[in-house]
Image: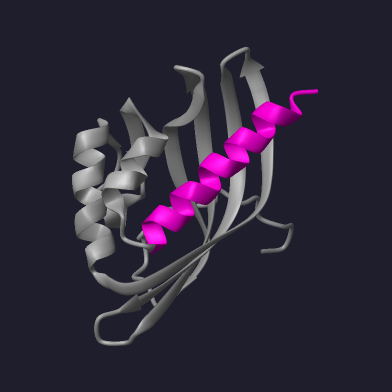
Amino acid sequence: MRLDDRAEIIELLTRYCEYLDEYDIDAVATVFTEDYVFDPGPGNGGPLQGRDIIVAGQKERMGRWRRSHHQIGQTRIEFTGDDTAHGVTYVIAWHQSWGNVSCIGRLRYVDDFVRAGGSWLISKRVLIELGVEGFPEGTWNPLDRKVPAGH
């Protein structure tokens, strides 16, 4: 079992949420690889690559909010090599604007992880929307959900 690696990845995800909610975007940068790829969805600029570009975008996007709260839930991690992994993490992301309007996103972080220099980092993330309140349509990538018969 790779329980230590799994625990380190969960810790990485937790730090990301803490840094984001504290608006410590420079600290957020420490969880990504240099060539990090981020796809926050069409309403957030679409796919981007490069830690510096993404951090600049995070400063702008997260600067819109007076407060935020990112709560991670269940996480599934599959190790794809000695130093690589893929994960899916459920997230509830609450945001409050400077005008006190609240928005909630129920999301999945679909991540690729690599171990570099002895530490796990996020090398790619796609945000998948499961449901939102208060955000405009098309903010994130929608879940490609199967349609039940008769619908």
Figure quadrant of the C terminus: bottom right
Q: Which part of the image, by quadrant, shows the N terminus?
A: top right
Q: Position of residue 12 (x, y in %)?
A: 52, 40
Residue occupying the far bottom of the picture: 100
* Nearer to us in this view, 136 or 76: 76
Residue 62 drawn above or below residue 122: below
Q: Residue at x 58, y 43 (%)?
A: 11
* Magenta region: 1-21
Residue 72 is left or right of residue 129, and the answer is right
**Is residue 140 visible to the viewer in this orientation of the structure?**
no
Q: Where is residue 69? Give x, y as percent.
A: 47, 68
Does the magenta segment cover residue 113?
A: no
Q: Of residues 27 and 46, which is closer to you in this image? A: 27
Judge left or right: residue 142 versus residue 151. left
- Compared to residue 71, the image places residue 53 above or below, namely above
- Percent coordinates x, y for residue 119 in the rendering: 50, 25
Look at the image and say whether residue 9 sits in the magenta stretch: yes
